[in-house]
Image (spheres, coloured by chain):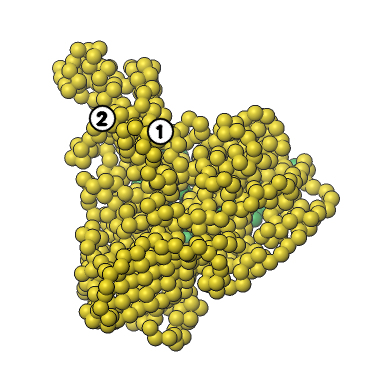
Chain colours: A yellow, B green
Amino acid sequence: MNLAFLGPQPADGRPKLPGSLQVNRRLDQWLRMLPEGAVVLTPGKVELGQGILTALAQIAAEELDVALPRIRVQAAATPTSPDEAVTSGSLSVQESGMAIRHACAEARGIFVGVIAQRSGVSREDIVVRDGDFVAPDGRVLGSYWSLAEAALLAVEATPDATPKRADQRRVTGTSAARLDLPEKVFGAPRFIQDLRLPGMLHARMVRPAARGAKLVSLRDGALPNGATIHRDGSFLAVLAPEEHEAEAAALRVAARAEWAVRDTLPDHTESWLAGAPGEASTVLDRVAETPEPAHRVSGRFFRPFVTHASIGTCCALAQWDGARMRIWSHSQGIYNLRADLVKAMHLPAEAFHIQHVEGAGCYGHNGADDVALEAALLARAHPGVPVRVLWSRAEELGWGPVSPAMLVDVAAEADAEGTLLRWTQHVTSNGHSGRPGRGALPTLLAASILAEPFAVPNAINPPLAGGGGAQRNAVPGYAIPALHVGMTHLAEMPVRTSALRGLGALANVWAIESVMDEMAAKAGADPLAYRLRQMEDARARDVLTRAAEMANWSGRVKREGFGLGLAVARYKGTGAWCAAVAEIEAAERVFCRRLWLAADVGEVINPDGTLNQIEGGAIQATSLCLLEQVRHDARNVLAGSWEDYPILRFSEVPQVEATLVARPEAPPLGAGECSMGPVIGAIANAIADALDIRLRHWPFTPENIAKAIEPTCPN
Amino acid sequence: MSTSFHLNGAAVAAPIAPEASLLAALRGPLGLSGTRFGCGAEQCGACLVLVDDHPQFACTLPVSAVAGRRVTTVEGLGTPDSPHPVQRALLELQAGQCGFCLSGIQIRAVALLRETPRPSEDQVRAALEPHLCRCGSHNRILRAILRAAEEMAPMEAAPRGATP
């Protein structure tokens, strides 16, 4: 989530502007010209490995009529960048891209207007050629660069700019190469983990021995050369000039710390979900009289806690000079981070200057914000000295926010032909957003263990209009006369939860698409035809038909030990459409061997980048549903290493064919998350096809498959 | 207190305790941050380097163990002006998303192609098994390595009966 989280903005009498331009209206917040012939683009959205900076540069180059290499995209920083809230929710092209499209179209118009006035050439006759303004007779009348110092963009945007029509675009819609990838391939220092500041101290956290544990005492003892300890309540860290010495010191200090521990985590996650107190609400209620059904399908779908599992670990640097706190962070939302730092550190917002620096792959709200507070707290204790904090693998897997465990209860009714009559769906979950910057209390990890601690705020589920959380995609995209969708938001949060790519959509789409397959089977219908005849959304039908064609669904031949399944969803009900067909092999465990994906993201800014995102989401979803669950005992998350939280490896990765349905005239929609729910649904349905069992427990491991084979009560 | 070895073709002395990891030496005093820290336990492959042409996890290898030996990191494979064929193929196929895993994967690919100039896709997958990628760029990476193999050892030039 992001700006959409804010919901409709209050009417302030100002005209509506596209995307984030609505709340960041000055053009010079978004771009400026350099005399040497370059455009500096300053979006508030950040690069997470998804290629957004390249897409935004393409949009700017298009509207300004300059060559793409002239665009220099500057990473976001407070306080100068536009506040685009969080880079999340597959909304960066809509929010940042459409703002930049409009701002650049307007900027172009302003420059052309000035040139026209100065030259006497009518503005309609001026052509912009790679930044030069050219008269009909070929004279170059000036350029963006010659007017770079004229402060022409120190104005607010107006609704009057007219970006190019789809048929006029030449730069967007092409697969420009990623701007950031060469440095990453050649190993140039670009990641935040690579940043070194003169005189910097390396810090490591010493984590509590259990969730909620309190530091009782710390035995004295020798430390490696130059290492020091910082303690504030149960917030415990070591600092040293050399990184390996900080690591060694952290191990020693951990062995000398005594913690008061208690049991805080549930025994059995599924039973806990079913019985924990929470607030029930109605997401959608459509009342209709329906006849006595011929078929019923019901089930309870359980998804465990899962986590981000980035290959790089969280990192931040901070430097305090007594008045200003400089922070280097891979946060997804530097202004949101700033808001929580203000609360946690009792410093004014103006004190914080936060520079975004790219981190390893980010798939949601991980520990990037948490580590920034840790660095800032340590920097405040060491004025003038830059402090760098890096998390260990165990911290990355065990202490960042996790994605909530969920129950999805579905009951569906259909007539003799299988036509849906009634559907109820109830989602039980912790909140899917514990992001900073949105509540009265800081959500940052360290805030709750300081000597003057803050209570841990319960993560929330934003309203469906803002994308939703647990209830994301809980409303089936099929024609159903009587529909009730509800949600229970749990009051207790034993493990800190927050947003992970797709939020509740993954479990909801899995549940819905499993029930659809079961109902099709009861009605004796083909799963493809069954879905198509109950989908009113033509774009959903199109992607499903396309994916089925790619997989030769109608010509499929049953193979022993293999299964084929399909699923479809429109992400969030408002985003991109995606359909998936999965082929699985049921061997000693289940492997997904092939995936066919068709997606409709509206206008495509960068087709190759979009396909990369769709395939990446699909492979990550395959890993999530086949392998992943956060394990814990009564006191701790048990994720000290990759052995405790395995993810898909190269030998297990399916072949993927992905295609985009061309809609150049349609508004662009984000691509990063749309494939995930459909892939999980398709894999579950393919397992049912191969083994004739209906999985109700994620991950789809031999153990959980065995559970499904045990006899259950007939519905 | 320093350890001398050859790093990407140049003699270096790493001023760091001998028990410190090669990874700490590279990323710290030697100032080459292309080799990544991912887990510190030989479980993700992000820190892979070549020691005397053999792939080694730099996260657990004491720097003293490379005294007098030849170490190659991602920075030693190629440059933007003169990329290694694996690097060229990765960029041509845009085979990456966050890119954090790519340093170690490139080192693995170079080692593989030295031993097996024309690997099958399954052989590439098997070679990359110690490497984790979370973004889902696996298939592009596989294709890039196969493309690099083709460029480095065209089919007609491949020796008959090359390692299966």
**Screen quadrant of the C terminus of chain A:** bottom left
Residue beneath the point at 64% across and 52% down? A455
Q: Would residue A59 appear left or right of B53 to someone viewing this image?
A: left
Q: Quadrant of residue A685?
A: bottom left
Q: Is residue A381 above or below residue A301?
A: above
Task: Please name the residue that numbered disc 1 is placed on.
Answer: A24
Tag 2: amino acid: Asp
Residue B85 horizontal side relative to residue A455, left or right: left
In the image, B42 versus A161, the foreground residue is A161
Q: Residues within 10 Å of mark 2 (few under 14, many from 20)?
A: few
Residue wearing tag 2: A160
Q: Of residues B125 and A591, which is closer to you in this image?
A: A591
In terms of depth relative to the viewer, which is nearer, A114 or B31?
A: A114
* Residue A1 horizontal/vertical position (percent): 43, 49
Q: Residue at x 55, y 72 (%)?
A: A275
> What amino acid is found at the position of numbered circle 1 in the picture?
Asn
Q: Where does the image place residue A109, in percent across and percent down from the top left?
A: 26, 25
Q: Is residue A582 visible?
A: no
Rendering coords of residue A637 (x, y %): 62, 63
Query: Upstream in the sequence, badge 2 or badge 1?
Result: 1
Image location (x, y in percent) of residue A702: 48, 78
- Relative to B50, A84 lies left or right: left
Q: Tell me, yes or no, whether dots 2 and 1 are on the same chain.
A: yes
Residue at point 53%, 64% (across, down): A278
Q: In what element is the residue under mark 1?
A: loop
